[in-house]
Image (tube, helix red, strand yellow):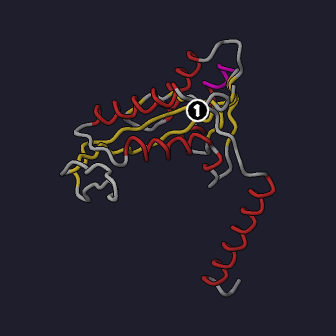
Amino acid sequence: MGLCIDEKTQIHAVDRTQLARPWRRHRPQTVTHDYRRNGTTTLFAALNVATGQVLGPWVSQHRHEEFMDFLARVDRKVPRRRAIHAIVDNHATHQQPAVHAWLADHPRFHLHFTPTSSSWLNLVERWFRDLTVDAVRRGSFRNVPALIAAIHRDIATRNAEATPLVWTAGVDHILAKVKRGRVALQQVQSQLDPQK
């Protein structure tokens, strides 16, 4: 089973000072610029690559202990006969000796690390973006439990209608884009440091 696993930290429970005006014909939805922060939460999530479904518990902190608890939850949810290939980033949380020891005791887990500065390769990041846009950004939450309830509703809705993400860009197109990005970066670096 292929899973994309990551954490989204510092999700703010933001309470707007005025209710958002809904979208109407010839007028977009609006929200006020001023707000109060009523706490934060952290979300660990696993996106099933084959189905598009999401598994995600909430925690108050982002440490290797919570990451191991999340892996244990995934271990309980996935049928025992299946190997678990998890795509994760190179965050220090995933590299702790305790995590390595846990993985040694659970040989069906195989972690595959994305290269540094390439977390966009992990599909769960795309889902985090959708979650932010659809459930968090324009919301108003008086407290963290209200924020968590909104995230639960979004996950339940998505899981009921889940479909796997299909890459529409070809490999050649993606690699050409990466090459153009490197050229642009080198040009900027040479302008900033003319001695190179």
Q: Give the image location of residue 167, x and y in percent.
A: 70, 45
Task: Name the residue rendered at 64%, 52% in the picture.
Answer: 118
Local crowd size for mark 1, using a 10 Å CA cut-off: few (<14), some (14–19), many (≥20): many
Magenta stretch: dominant SS? helix
Specify the quadrant of the image occupied by residue 93. top right
Residue 152 on the magenta segment: no
Can you name the residue that lies furthest to the bottom here?
A: 194
Q: Where's residue 176, x and y in %?
A: 77, 63
- Magenta span has 103? yes
Picture residue at 67% right of the left edge, 82% below the top: 190
Q: Is residue 69 left or right of residue 2?
A: left
Q: Residue furthest left?
A: 17
Residue most toward the right? Answer: 172
**Residue behind mark 1:** 47
Amino acid type at circle 1 is: Leu
SS at circle 1:
strand
Q: Residue at x 29, y 55 (%)?
A: 30
Eyeballing the image, is 52 above or below 26? above
